[in-house]
Image (cartoon, helix red, strand yellow):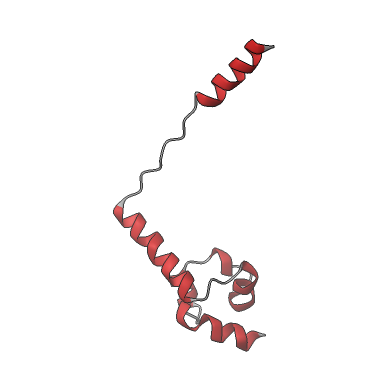
Amino acid sequence: MKTKKKATRAKKLAKPKQAQARSKVARAHIAEGTRLFALAGRPTKAQFVKVYGPQGPKMTWEQRAKAGVDARHFQEALKAKS
């Protein structure tokens, strides 16, 4: 019994996760998306669907702005749709 537990523990400890290395450009894009998300009032997926349609949660902020509502005016558009 003890050897089985030790073998299981060894398997679990044998695979350390490696940190994902991201480029400076990727980190900048992630930071900008997070900033715009906060600017929009941290909307839920349901709110994205209400304003942008079914593809809303999958769109980037640039695509959402081209659709007619940018992050700065998201809450106003949400109130108008309600």
Q: Position of residue 49 (x, y in %)?
A: 63, 72
Quarter of the image containing the N terminus? top right
Q: Position of residue 18 (x, y in %)?
A: 42, 36
Tell me where residue 32 sits by quadrant. Answer: bottom left
How many circles with numbers are drawn on the protein? 0
The residue sitting at 60% across, 69% down in the picture is: 44
Q: Please give left or right for residue 8 compared with residue 64 in the image.
A: right
The residue sitting at 59% across, 15% down in the picture is: 7
The residue sitting at 65% across, 12% down in the picture is: 2
User: Above or below — where is 55 with respect to 75?
Assistant: above
Which residue ends up furthest to the front in the rendered image? 2
User: Above or below — where is 27 with respect to 77?
Assistant: above
Q: Please give left or right for residue 39 compared with residue 4 in the image.
A: left
Task: Pick whichever, 63 or 40, lies toward us.
Answer: 40
Quarter of the image containing the C terminus? bottom right
Tell me where residue 72 sits by quadrant. Answer: bottom left
Which residue ends up furthest to the right in the rendered image? 1
The residue sitting at 52% across, 25% down in the picture is: 13
Which residue ends up furthest to the left in the rendered image? 24
Q: Position of residue 39 (x, y in %)?
A: 46, 75
Q: Position of residue 66 (x, y in %)?
A: 46, 77
